[in-house]
Amino acid sequence: GSTFSCILGMSEVDNGGTKQFVGFIRDVTLQKSLLLAQAEREASDSLLFNILPEHIARRLKQDPSHIADLYNNTTILFADIVGFTDRTSVMSPHDVVMMLNDIFSRFDYLVDVYDLNKVKTIGDCYMVTSIPTDELENDGCSRVCRFALDMFKAVRAFNNTGPRHGQINFRIGIATGQVVAGVVGTKRFLFDMWGDAVNVAARMEQSGLAGQIQVTKEVVESAGPDFNFERRGTLTIKGKGPMEVFILKSAQEPSGRHSELDRRKSNSSRALRAFSMLDNYHDS
């Protein structure tokens, strides 16, 4: 004999005034297989959408060949822990991972709030961009700038918890410009990007000041009037030469009753959870 998935049932029927009970058995092997296959597809899609921007993941499902696109207006942010190597030299591997997981998880919440793209973490470096699209983004730069300011709020909240190995600080750098972005390889997909703007953003972080957000002149011009910048001066940037750089100091609240950010706060459950957590940080 063999075993199979089935449904057993029994019904009472009236057969010419005589009540009888009728039993039935139905083979549901096929239905079970279809449900399992659907659950596996949904789990696979969920993992893919967690790894890649949604529009890139959908393209990859439709066409598994390599994706490579040119984007003319993308804002890139790099953030790095000040003195990370010296700090971690006296920490256990477990404590290092726990520290990074705590602070980076706080950043991840903010990525959802501002609808940004977390590209990757490399050691203690956290890389974020406005999500590249085929259309010219009008608010991508401003969202990244607001995200950067809230990153420091999250860092202060982390420090207020009395971390075991002392308080931490970050340098943040931002640049905006043209990038090439795509998915390369066939294992452990990563939506990465390359170009002069990426290199400049990394240099903005590396040459920046602890506890400050250093940006290029293009960021100042793209962010809009709601932000306050302070000119730092002209620095010699590796690979670029002299560049005028600025420090992002603060931002006004988004203007307009129906601003895009207000819409995200109202309509996105993930954003609401993130802002709730950020409020808890402030109260801690």
Image (spheres, rainbow, N blue to C red):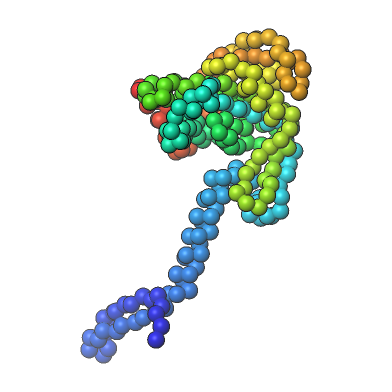
Q: Would residue 150 appear left or right of 159 to someone viewing this image?
A: right
Number of on-image labels: 0
Q: Is residue 49 visible?
A: yes
30 sits to left or right of 242: left
Residue furthest to the left in view is: 18
Q: Going 57% across and 26% down the picture, which residue do you hit?
A: 79
The x and y percentages for residue 183 are 67, 45
Q: Is residue 50 above or below residue 236?
A: below
Of residue 81 and residue 88, the one placed in the foreground of this image is: 88
Residue in the image at 64% along x and 46% along y: 56
Q: Residue at x 61, y 14 (%)?
A: 247
Residue 225 picture location, percent across and down: 62, 16
- Image quadrant holding the N terminus, namely bottom left
Q: Is residue 266 visible?
A: no
Work out whether residue 212 or residue 265 is closer to the camera in this orientation and state it: 212
60 vs 158, nearest the viewer: 158
Residue 248 location, quadrant:
top right
On screen, residue 8 above or below 153: below
The quarter of the image holding the C terminus is top left
In the displayed structure image, the side of residue 58 where residue 178 appears, left or right = right
Residue 7: where, in percent of width, then height?
36, 75
Query: Relative to 237, is 107 above or below?
Result: below
Identify whether 124 is placed above or below 189. Answer: above
Rendering coords of residue 262 (x, y %): 50, 28
Give the residue displayed 26% in from the left and 81% down from the top: 12
